[in-house]
Image: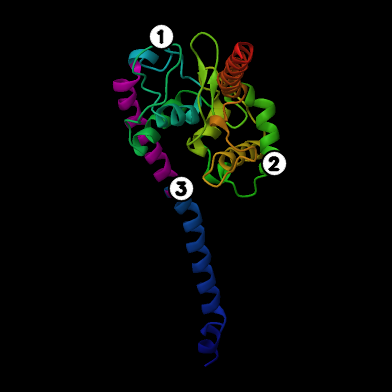
Amino acid sequence: MKKLSARRRHPLAALVVLLFALAVTGGLYAAFAPADKAQADDTAQSLAIKEGKKLFAVGCASCHGTGGQGTTDGPSLVGVGAAAVDFQVGTGRMPAQQPGAQVPRKKNIYTNAQIDQLAAYVASLGAGPTVPEKSQYSSDGADIGKGGELFRTNCAQCHNFTGKGGALTNGKYAPTLEGVDPKHIYEAMETGPQNMPSFGDGSLSKQNKKDIIAYLGAVNGDESESPGGLDLGGLGPVSEGLFGYIFGLGALVAVAIWVAARTTKAKKS
């Protein structure tokens, strides 16, 4: 009887075994589950790069080179980042229809998935600005007044004080920002397309960019009002000066003719 009692398992033995099994299971999950997820992400990214390379070979390589190294017809894309591709292709500027002083915005010919694939391939050529998250360019938490100050300081000299655009030299121009996707405005500030300088986080912080985008949305929105009345397209002194020249000078000529006619009539009397 004493032998049998000695061999009887301790009441907590089952609990210890259960805890050990749970610990082993949790350890195995922690060891293998994240690795599986990371492997799946890597596979998806590799597939996107592969498909993007095919699209690049068809639509971009003739100007930018088969490896994105650039040619006499197009600059190198090494290091421009995914944001530059998303902007240029997403706004229809690329692929370009024809060479010129500036490539205009036009209808986009790629789907969003194809743009993502092209961006993934170009990003694989060298590190550069990434496509921003929605939280970075939404108006949530933005300071519209501060955005107006920043825009007038850094952007208005080319884009006009409300983003209507303006002429530059040698056939170039600053395009209108009215109706442009906020994401593309953010990407333009990050990458500096064509004649525009780039504004990295050292020049304009992420919050600064958010404020500028919110300002543009406010002044060009459907609910915006012009406190001065007729804004003449918001193009500034050019349109206002032309208005004053045509109507002001016309009124002066009309008054001069009227005065001369009255004077002549008075003399004849």
Say whether residue 62 is left or right of residue 144: left
Name the quadrant of the C terminus.
top right
**Badge 3 amino acid:** Ala
Tell me, for residue 35, which label it has, or none.
Answer: 3
Look at 50% across and 27% down and name the residue there. 81
Amino acid bearing label 2:
Gly
Q: Position of residue 162 (x, y in %)?
A: 59, 32
Q: CA distance from mark 2 to mark 1?
A: 44 Å
Secondary structure of the residue carrying numbered label 3:
helix
Q: Is residue 187 above or below residue 64?
A: below
Q: Nearer the viewer, mark 2 or mark 3?
A: 2
Q: CA distance from mark 2 to mark 3?
A: 47 Å
Query: Mark 1 highlights which residue?
Result: 71
Horizontal arrangement in the rendering, residue 230 relative to residue 115 (left or right): right
Q: Which residues are magenta?
A: 37-61
Earlier in the chain: of badge 2 and badge 1, it is 1
**Of residues 120 and 32, which is closer to you in this image?**
120
Q: In the picture provided, is 73 more to the left or to the right than 243?
A: left
Question: Most extreme residue toward the bottom, as rendered?
Answer: 1
The relative height of residue 1 versus residue 82 in the rendered view (above or below) is below
Q: Residues within 10 Å of mark 2 (few under 14, many from 20)?
A: few
Assess whether residue 101 is covered by the magenta stretch. Answer: no
Residue 202 appears in the figure: no
